[in-house]
């Protein structure tokens, strides 16, 4: 089907331009500014997953409407595996404006991990751990288990604590939820 190729080319150029703009923004702005953007985006995704998973403030309805406009009838299909979610995690996993739940979790993983890499604030490391636990609880996505490992490793690098111990403690804490 040749009608797909123009869209793929457009996606490629959008990704390329986004990468160049991101590079220029990071060169131009301070580390503190970059940390704020990444931390605030991680916070926004955490709050969004919470609101959508608990069906508060009409976030689920707005998210579903936006998803239907963006993804229905296009190259991306709407996520329709709610029955599978109920069987595996016991609830309909939130999508938070993405085409499927795993992409919301992947977005959180990318923003929170990037924040952890450039973070200089000790206390925000602990907030990101709390956000990881909350996002995993709200989304049920196994992708977020990787965030615990990255968090443990980066925490150990910054504090000289064995990262395997930290990651295992974080996962054990998660087991109590």
Image: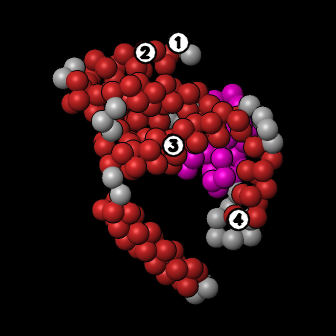
Q: Nearer the viewer, mark 4 or mark 2?
A: 4
Task: Kindly tell me whether residue 109 is visible in this rendering.
Answer: no
Report which residue position mark 1 lands on: 176
Q: Position of residue 12 (x, y in %)?
A: 46, 75
Left or right placement of residue 9 versus residue 19 in this view:
right
Disc 4 residue crowd, few under 14, some 14–19, many 20+, Cα 10 Å: some
Percent x, y of residue 160: 18, 23
Q: Residue at x 37, y 71 (%)?
A: 20
Of circles 3 and 4, the one toward us is 3
Drawn side of residue 28 relative to residue 52, left or right: left
Q: Residues within 10 Å of mark 1 (few under 14, many from 20)?
A: few
Q: Position of residue 163 (x, y in %)?
A: 25, 24
Q: Indicate whether 84 appears above or below 173.
A: below
- Asked if the residues shown at circle 1 and circle 2 are in contact, with their CB atoms under 8 angstroms apart, the answer is yes
Task: Name the mark nearer the viewer: 1 or 3.
Answer: 3
Identity of the residue drawn at 64% across and 70% down: 75
Label 3 packing within 10 angstroms: few (<14), some (14-19), many (20+): some
Secondary structure of the residue carrying tag 4 is helix
Determine whether label 3 and label 4 are within 8 Å by CB.
Answer: no
Cα separation, mark 3 vs mark 2, equals: 27 Å
- Which of the 4 quarters of the picture holds residue 25? bottom left
Q: Which residue is mark 4?
A: 70
Q: Which is more N-terminal, label 2 or label 4?
A: 4
Q: Label 1, label 2: how many angstroms apart (C-alpha)? A: 7 Å
Q: Which residue is mark 2?
A: 172
The residue at the far top in this view is: 176
Depth check, mark 3 against mark 2: the one in front is 3
């Amino acid at each position: 089907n040749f009608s797909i190729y123009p869209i793929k080319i457009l996606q490629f150029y959008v990704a390329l331009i986004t990468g160049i703009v991101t590079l220029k923004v990071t060169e131009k702005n301070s580390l503190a500014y970059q940390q704020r953007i990444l931390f605030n985006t991680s916070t926004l995704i955490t709050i969004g997953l919470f609101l959508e998973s608990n069906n508060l403030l009409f976030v689920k309805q707005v998210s579903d409407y936006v998803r239907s406009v963006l993804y229905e009838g296009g190259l991306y299909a709407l996520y329709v595996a709610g029955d599978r979610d109920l069987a595996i995690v016991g609830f309909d996993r939130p999508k938070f404006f993405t085409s499927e739940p795993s992409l919301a979790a992947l977005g959180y993983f990318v923003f929170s991990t990037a924040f952890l890499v450039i973070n200089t604030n000790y206390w925000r490391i602990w907030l990101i751990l709390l956000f990881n636990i909350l996002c995993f609880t709200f989304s049920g996505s196994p992708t977020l288990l990787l965030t615990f490992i990255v968090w443990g490793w980066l925490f150990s690098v910054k504090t000289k604590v064995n990262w395997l111990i930290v990651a295992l403690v974080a996962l054990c804490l998660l087991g109590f939820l």
